[in-house]
Amino acid sequence: LQSLQNTLHDIEKEALSHYKLHPPTNVTSILSLTHSSFTQGAQSAEHERIKELVCGIHPLIQEDTALLFARDIFDKVFSLSDKIIAEQKTLPMQPSTDLYVLMLVNEVCLFVLQTAREKNAQLVTNELTTLFLQHEKRWQHKYIAVNFIRLRLINMQDFDKQLTEALQQPVSATSRQIVEFAGSVVQRCLVDEQLITQKDLKNTLETLGKIAKNPPPGNQGA
């Protein structure tokens, strides 16, 4: 576990050094595991080092240690998401170097969770599902939910059940936030990217449909 923490620290340090010397000029110049440009060549010595560090993560995680790594990284994903949102609110029209670094480290953490799942799918998926559904901020981070769904890190039946129950809470600021969360997840996962089928969110969709037909006071015409 300490090796992984050291790796994440080194990636963050190398990314900061990279951006200090090579500020992003376009999308392809942003260091991101989701861009093909990340693995094709290197923009700098720091970029090359980051690629080496990321490649070294997979061998660190074995079947008997996958659960430990998943638990260790889970809270960091929520912490990073909080920081990313705060950074985006600070400079919404002009992303900062800090934001790019946070986003890269977040992608690496998701890669760790994905790797842990590859090594021990059932155990890791069940644990991450439990951790997510018990987290106090679970309905505040739609992007975490979407990423977990995309990477198959969460049990959809359990997710659908708890989200449905949350949507049935009495009207409040929190309940409105949950409706927004559910709508965003449905839009992203069912419409935009088609990551799942309607069957996976059957109860959530039915509940959202009922809310749309009979919106709570204050929501009409919204």
Image: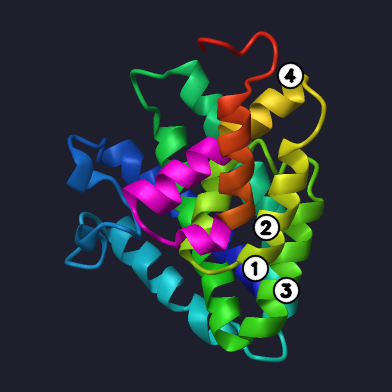
* Amino acid marked by disc 2: Phe
- Pick whichever, 199 or 21, lies toward us: 199
Residue 190 percent coordinates (x, y): 41, 52
Disc 1 target residue: 155
How many residues crowd mark 4 within 10 Å: few (<14), some (14–19), many (20+)? few
Sequence-earlier tag: 2 or 3: 3
The image quarter in which residue 207 lies: top right
Depth-wise, is mark 2 or mark 3 nearer the camera? 2
Q: Residue at x 19, y 59 (%)?
A: 37
Q: Are marks 1 and 3 in contact (CB under 8 Å)?
A: yes
* Amino acid marked by disc 3: Asn
Residue 45 in view of the camera: yes
Disc 2 target residue: 159
Which element is circle 3 on?
helix
Between the residue at mark 4 and the residue at mark 2, the CA separation in whole angstroms equals 21 Å
Disc 3 target residue: 126
Residue 168 percent coordinates (x, y): 76, 37
- Total marks placed: 4
Sequence-earlier tag: 1 or 3: 3
Residue 132 percent coordinates (x, y): 72, 55
Q: Is residue 191 one of those drawn in magenta?
A: yes
Q: Which residues are magenta?
A: 182-201
- Pick whichever, 209 or 77, lies toward us: 209
In the displayed structure, would residue 22 be above or below residue 117?
above
Q: Which mark is residue 173?
A: 4
Q: Is residue 71 left or right of residue 95?
A: right
Between the residue at mark 2 and the residue at mark 3, the CA separation in whole angstroms equals 11 Å
Q: Are marks 1 and 2 in contact (CB under 8 Å)?
A: yes
Q: Residue at x 40, y 40 (%)?
A: 100
Q: Which residue, as the protein is rendered here, is positioned at the far bottom?
A: 63
